[in-house]
Image: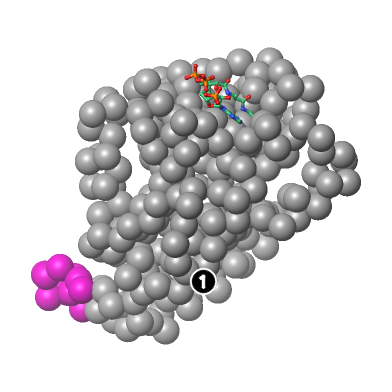
Amino acid sequence: MVYQNILLETNERISTLTINRPDKRNALNQATRDEILQALNSLNRSAETRVLIVTGAGDKAFIAGADIGEFEGRTALTQRESMKGSRIFDALEDFPKPVIAMINGFCLGGGMELALACDIRIASDGAKLGQPEINLGIIPGGGGTQRLTRLVGEGKAMELILTGDLIDAVEAKAIGLVNDVVPARELQDRVRGLAGRIAEKSPIALRMAKEAVKTASRLNLREGLDRETDLFSLTFASEDKTEGVRAFLEKRKPDFKGR
Ligand code: COA
């Protein structure tokens, strides 16, 4: 598959999907959203990929939001139609392998929503984050009002969404929006190191763990606990569980095969 708007590479069980429109600050146009969906489908099927890193090309932006040029001329109906076709945010959230957002600059609007749909967010110290849609007379439409609120609480989410103000990476960490802030020159190594540590775990356990944690914001506590019990029990059907327990008892490193 040849992509025009993204780059895809896989190295030592870690795949990196790079939005590659640096001249447009990696803004998400329709073609880019379609390519992201196709890439997620193929990475999902590939046993080689155990962890996915999502980032933006260049040193200025992670993703500066939806491509605002495409909004001009859109009616409510055509906008709704265009959103149905490419629900990249849901596809990322439901992607069965861990996804890390490597936030290397402006992370705005749809870019922030894409980061929110990832499992872990690591930002460079120069990154700026926000939901500036209100300045265009619109509101977040890629999950921002829901996922941001669940992550940082209603008060902070309201403030960010109602003012459209950008915050820096240090403040983003303080409110729990990003997991960590690292110097820009160390960002790639730190994120790859984190991805590498996760990639060594059992892919089956990772999948169950992600699904179980996601359940916490979808179901009530009793249903969530029941789901956790089911997923926990299911890991006992894997060879990886046998290997993990045996390796511990034999005082050696486990070699998880994803079976
Ligand atoms: N959609 C479409 N084009 C965008 C874009 C977006 N979301 N963000 C940036 N671009 C384009 C600019 O139009 C410009 O294109 P041009 O060179 O053809 O004129 C190019 O990317 C560079 O942007 P510029 O504003 O010159 O870069 P900057 O480094 O000074 O500022 C931003 C970067 C991200 C702060 C600024 O571009 C911006 O505010 N973008 C819009 C953010 C936004 O509102 N996102 C939410 C959308 S719902």
Report whether 68 appears left or right of 127.
right
- Asked if one can make out residue 246 in the rendered structure from this viewpoint, the answer is yes
Q: Residue 171's x, y, as percent? A: 46, 19
Quarter of image, ligand 1? top right
Rendering quarter of residue 140? top right
Q: Where is residue 128 shown, x and y percent of the image?
A: 47, 22
Is residue 249 toward the left or the right of residue 57 in the image?
left
Residue 139 on the magenta span: no
Please give the name of the residue rendered at 67% of the width and 55% of the height, measured from the top-left corner: 86
- In this rendering, does residue 221 appear at all? no
Residue 154 in the image, given as x and y percentages of width and height: 68, 28
* Residues in magenta, as a range: 245-255
Residue 247 magenta: yes
Q: Secondary structure at mark 1?
A: helix
Residue that numbered label 1 is attached to: 231
Q: Is residue 189 left or right of residue 68?
A: left
Label 1 crowd (10 A; few <14 / some 14-19 / many >=20): some
Q: Which of the two residues, 109 or 246, is positioned nearer the viewer here?
A: 109
